[in-house]
Amino acid sequence: MIEARHLRVLRAVASTGSFSAAGRELGCTQPAVSQQMKALESSVGTPLLVRTGREMRLTQAGEALVRHAAGIIAGLTAAEEEVAAIAGLRAGRVRLVSFPSGSSTLVPTALAALRAAHPGTRVFLEEAEPPNSVELLREGDCDVALAFRYEGAAGAEEWDDLVVRPLLTDRLVALVPEGHRLARTEGSVAIGELARESWIAGCPRCRGQLVEVCEGAGFSPRIDFATDDYPAVVGLVGAGLGVAVLPQLAVESVRPRGVRTVALEPAVRREIVALTLPDLAQVPAVAATLDELARAGARQSAAR
């Protein structure tokens, strides 16, 4: 196998005409140049240089190798510079997948800070709910996935093969119309007090969590409307068409008009995290993105 360091020595010998002059150019000794040339000739299986008196002359094979060496070394140099730029965060690409309420709250803050600190790093954003976002990560279609899981839910081991970066803990809150009997309630209310209400449900995973919480309180919610769009949920509640339970982060992602938020008991929380693969966690641009997402989560928690 031909090594790049041997090609650099060959070019130096070809341009200077001797081992000693090549050594001075490369900053090494004449015996070191001779040894590397022998190693190169052994690799290619044919002589590359012929000594004529005090000078060195390239063989036909040597001339061919020198001719190709310029392009090979130039390509390697370009590759080294590009990798150095990525490692130094002067360049890089991160593919980020987030669920909608994360995209409108945590992600903008994190990416603005990332761009300010590392303007050469580009981030491409797509939206997907877990578990789809997690599957995209495992299949190599993204580098970082924002996901969530509810406290006490089954399947806590589903992320055991991933690097899990906690961002914040998000509590479920009830949304009621401004004129609702519970709208002025201070403190928390038991979810059972909403048992006879019409319900507006959110995304499939949140909908499943709603049903589970309600059944735990001894009733099944009568779901009149279901939508994945959080502003639509808020709008339906504000129009007096029912009540809803949403994660606090989802409420913060829209401008809730005509509604009131009410804390629920027992408290239901979800853990919001950033996920990546163990090897990707070592990539500087990915590590920097995880750091900024964690800072954004801390700021979001502090602002509550």
Image (cartoon, rainbow, N blue to C red):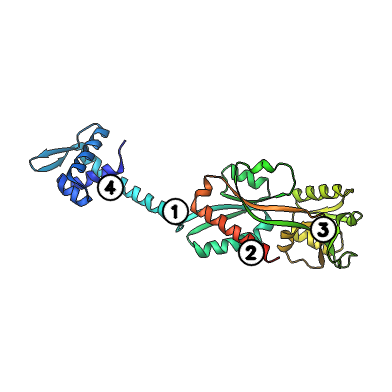
* Sequence-first disc among 3 and 4: 4
Residue 20 to residue 302: above or below: above
Question: Residue at coordinates 89% horizontally, 54% vertically from top-left?
Answer: 192
Q: Position of residue 252 (x, y in %)?
A: 72, 63
Q: Which residue is mark 2?
A: 299
Amino acid at dot 2:
Arg
Q: Which residue is mark 3?
A: 264
Indicate the secondary structure of the residue bearing disc 3: strand
Q: Which mark is residue 70?
A: 4
Question: Residue at coordinates 82% horizontally, 49% vertically from top-left?
Answer: 213
Q: Residues within 10 Å of mark 4 (few under 14, many from 20)?
A: some
Indicate the secondary structure of the residue bearing disc 2: helix
Indicate the secondary structure of the residue bearing disc 1: helix
Nearer the camera: disc 3 or disc 4: 3
Q: Which residue is mark 1?
A: 87
Amino acid at dot 1:
Ala
Indicate the secondary structure of the residue bearing disc 4: helix
Q: Position of residue 13 (x, y in %)?
A: 19, 45
* Sequence-first disc among 4 and 2: 4
Question: Seen in the image, is 164 located left or right of residue 224?
Answer: left
